[in-house]
Amino acid sequence: MNEITPGTIARADVRSGQYIGEIIEVNGPRAVFKVLAVLKHPEQGDLHHPYNPDVAMFHERRALGYTEKTNVLLRDLKPYEGEVPDYNTSLHEAVASQIAALDRLMRWSARGLELLKELRKDYK
């Protein structure tokens, strides 16, 4: 891995989201990371019970804001090459991508449920 130093543009995994940002400072095993764009919107719900809607608390997770600073472990950082996209555009694209994935999962689930109900009739 290339060395992470202040001023480096990096990709960071933060909780269940992924961001592009600038390293502001490095403190031992962590770095202060300033968010510039969103690559993957954080996942909703209980991360310990994925895809279970019947949990005690179904978490809403917002994306980190533009220029928001957060501490990130160095192991969760990778240098980023290329143009940094506009924050608002990247945020909307990340949300749209997650909505499309959940829609596909809902359609898969509905189709599987439909087929299992038909199979159940054959199994009697």
Image (cartoon, helix red, strand yellow):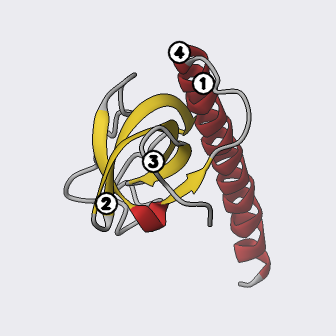
The residue tagged 1 is 90
Asked if residue 84 lies left or right of residue 24, the reply is right
- Among numbered discs 1 and 3, the one appearing first in the sequence: 3
Query: How far is disc 1 from disc 4 in space, using C-alphas?
Result: 5 Å
In the image, what residue type sits under mark 3?
Glu
Where is residue 104? Give x, y as percent.
71, 44
Label pair 1/3, CB-CB below 8 angstroms:
no
Identified by mark 4, the residue type is Asn
Side of 8 relative to 52 (left or right):
right
Q: Earlier in the sequence, mark 1 or mark 2?
A: 2
Instruction: Say which quarter of the image contains residue 47.
Output: bottom left
53 w.r.t. 117: above or below: above
Residue drawn at (74%, 84%) of the image: 123
Residue topped by disc 2: 30
Q: From this viewpoint, which residue is outermost toward the left?
A: 56
| Residue that carries the numbered disc 3 in the rendered image | 43
Q: Residue at x 69, y 65 (%)?
A: 117
* N-terminal-most mark, 3 or 2: 2
Q: Nearer the viewer, mark 3 or mark 2?
A: 2
Mark 1, Cα crowd under 10 Å, few <14 / some 14-19 / many 20+, is: many
Secondary structure category for the residue under label 1: helix
Q: Which residue is mark 4?
A: 88
Q: Marks 4 and 3: which is nearer the front?
A: 4
Amino acid type at image mark 2 = Arg
- Residue 68 makes an appearance in the image: yes
